[in-house]
Amino acid sequence: MPKITLHKNGEVHVGEVKDNTNLVVRAGIRQFPYPNLSYKCGMGKCATCRCRVISGGEHLPEPNWKEKKMLGEKIDEGYRLACQLWISHDIELSQDVD
């Protein structure tokens, strides 16, 4: 099971998820990373779930068109939209304070 590490507000939240899991879907049904992950639409239209990938990004697919549209140059800084990712490997993320 993939291990998820989420850095936010000076705290570190760690949990495991089933293989091929979307973190926003899990947060929406009140499972880890709920309540620590910020999100809204879950469809790549608002960028509220924007996270910077600290480690594990090599296992993610290339950013899709929604991520490119919403994140622009932030992609080059390691940012991704959590709602567009299906996690199958350990990953460490940081989410900016809104």
Image: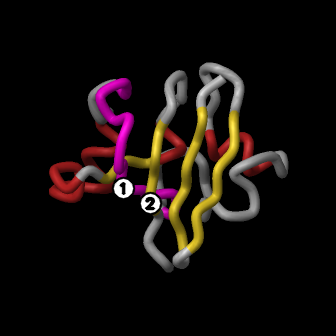
Q: x, y (%) of residue 2?
A: 60, 28
Residue 98: give x, y in percent of width and height.
Answer: 50, 79
Colouring: secondary structure
SS for dot 2: strand
Question: Marks 2 and 1, how far apart in space?
Answer: 5 Å
Quarter of the image for the N terminus: give it: top right
Please give the name of the residue rendered at 69% of the width and 36% of the height, measured from the top-left corner. 16
User: On the rendered structure, is 77 left or right of 26?
Assistant: left
For disc 2, the neighbor class at 10 Å (few under 14, some 14 to 19, many from 20) is many
Bounds of the magenta segment: 48-60
The total number of labels drawn is: 2
Q: Is residue 16 left or right of residue 69?
A: right
Q: Secondary structure at mark 1?
A: strand
Which residue was labeled with disc 1?
52
Q: Nearer the viewer, residue 73 or 14?
A: 14
Q: Residue 91, position in %: x, y?
A: 47, 38
Q: Is residue 58 magenta?
A: yes
Mark 2 touches mark 1? (CB < 8 Å): yes
Q: Say whether residue 15 is magenta.
A: no
Label of residue 94 in the image? 2
Q: Residue furthest right?
A: 30
Residue type at numbered disc 1: Arg
How far across and down, in percent of the image, does residue 34 sit? 74, 56
